[in-house]
């Protein structure tokens, strides 16, 4: 009897993605490690970081420690994926949006380089056009597809069809982090910070960040996120939402309460933001990700 096609591949995601620990551990989700710095200290994120470590990271940002991340070159992907290929396993890999990073391009190069050496198994990168909990939503869907018996090819096609349904909205509290990443001008950052402006951003159809609203103060900004939820939530497409915060639990709790009151049937996933994304958004970021 042949091997079940749904049992011969692993589901893998960037450490830049956020997924609840239980789903990752119970279903063998693999994480591609990513490097980041806090001040002069270089660290490696392997996904689902402990809350205490994340709090230390965001406290460090508040204290003035600079943070940055490093791109993964193709040869590092090759070394990471080889372990799975040696076992005869193929890999369904969810990459950080190509509009935010070169990880997808690097993963494609690695997959192509490994084809000749491992003809019986393959690497299948998916450009999620997403980040943080958007990657988590895709991974959870892929888990359910695999449980239903989908082959890796069928799962990849379903993921590509589902990606355009994802919606990411988030607010930031410190505009200087967006300025360092070239997302806003220095003048905008200085004036916005002085006026207590909280920009609301989204990831657009090309996987890039765009500003969609501006509010004065945290409460108004959080209410704006909730408005976007009411406008776009469609339980027929997906009844899971990820609310991820960069150590701003009060705001996150308030948003969770509003969402649950408006849609009691909704499954709310609550996580702290990966330091890979948090390095570029700063402490106090609050994101809401769903599919519609």
Image: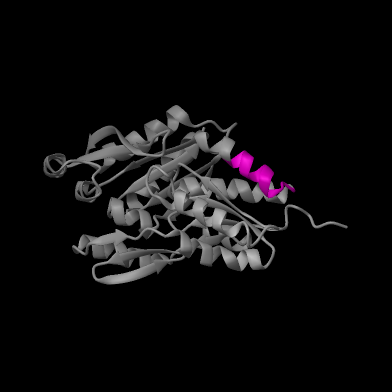
Q: Which residues are magenta?
A: 149-159
Q: Which quadrant, please, contains the N terminus? A: bottom right
Query: Which one is nearer the viewer's eye here, 34 or 82?
Result: 82
Find the residue positioned furthest to the bottom.
41
Q: Residue at x 67, y 61 (%)?
A: 89
Q: Main secondary structure of the magenta part?
A: helix
x, y percentage for residue 148?
73, 47
Task: Determine whether, in the image, residue 269 is placed left or right of residue 147.
Answer: left
Magenta highlight on residue 157: yes
Magenta highlight on residue 47: no
Task: Determine whether, in the image, residue 199 is placed left or right of residue 102.
Answer: left
Residue 234 position (above or below residue 184)? above
Q: How is the image coloured?
A: one colour
Query: Which one is nearer the viewer's eye here, 33 or 292?
Result: 33
Q: Residue at x 22, y 62 (%)?
A: 66
Task: Determine whether, in the image, residue 29 is placed left or right of residue 42.
Answer: right
Find the residue positioned furthest to the front.
116
Task: Determine whether, in the image, residue 178 is placed left or right of residue 29.
Answer: left
Asked whether the viewer can see residue 221, the reply is yes
x, y percentage for residue 3?
80, 57
Quadrant of the rendered image containing residue 118? bottom right
Total marks in image: 0
Query: Which one is nearer the viewer's eye here, 75 or 269?
Result: 75
x, y percentage for residue 249?
35, 54
Q: Residue at x 78, y 55 (%)?
A: 4
Q: Residue at x 52, y 63 (%)?
A: 78
Asked whether the viewer can see residue 19, the reply is no
x, y percentage for residue 117?
63, 62
Find the residue positioned furthest to the top.
231
């Amino acid at each position: 009897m042949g091997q079940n096609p749904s049992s011969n591949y692993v589901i893998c995601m960037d450490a830049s993605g956020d997924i609840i620990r239980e789903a990752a551990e119970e279903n063998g989700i693999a994480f591609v490690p990513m490097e980041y710095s806090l001040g002069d200290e270089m660290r490696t994120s392997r996904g689902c970081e402990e809350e205490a470590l994340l709090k230390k990271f965001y406290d460090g940002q508040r204290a003035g420690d600079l943070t940055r991340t490093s791109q993964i070159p193709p040869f590092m992907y090759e070394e990471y994926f080889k372990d799975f290929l040696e076992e005869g396993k193929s890999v369904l890999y969810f990459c950080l949006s190509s509009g935010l990073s070169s990880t997808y391009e690097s993963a494609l190069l690695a997959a192509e380089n490994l084809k000749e050496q491992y003809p019986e198994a393959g690497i299948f990168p998916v450009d999620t056009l997403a980040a943080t909990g958007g990657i988590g939503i895709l991974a959870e869907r892929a888990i359910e597809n695999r449980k239903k018996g989908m082959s890796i090819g069928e799962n990849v096609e379903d993921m590509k069809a589902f990606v355009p349904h994802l919606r990411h909205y988030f607010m930031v509290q410190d505009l200087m982090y967006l300025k360092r990443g070239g997302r806003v001008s220095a003048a905008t950052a200085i004036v916005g910070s002085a006026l207590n402006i909280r920009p609301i951003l989204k990831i657009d159809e090309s996987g890039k960040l765009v500003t969609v609203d501006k509010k004065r103060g945290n409460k108004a900004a959080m209410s704006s996120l909730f408005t976007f939820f009411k406008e776009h939530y469609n339980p027929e497409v997906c009844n899971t939402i990820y609310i991820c915060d960069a150590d701003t639990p009060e705001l996150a709790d308030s948003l969770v309460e509003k969402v649950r009151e408006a849609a009691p049937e909704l499954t709310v996933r609550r996580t702290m933001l990966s330091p890979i994304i948090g390095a570029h958004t700063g402490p106090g970021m609050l994101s809401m990700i769903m599919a519609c």
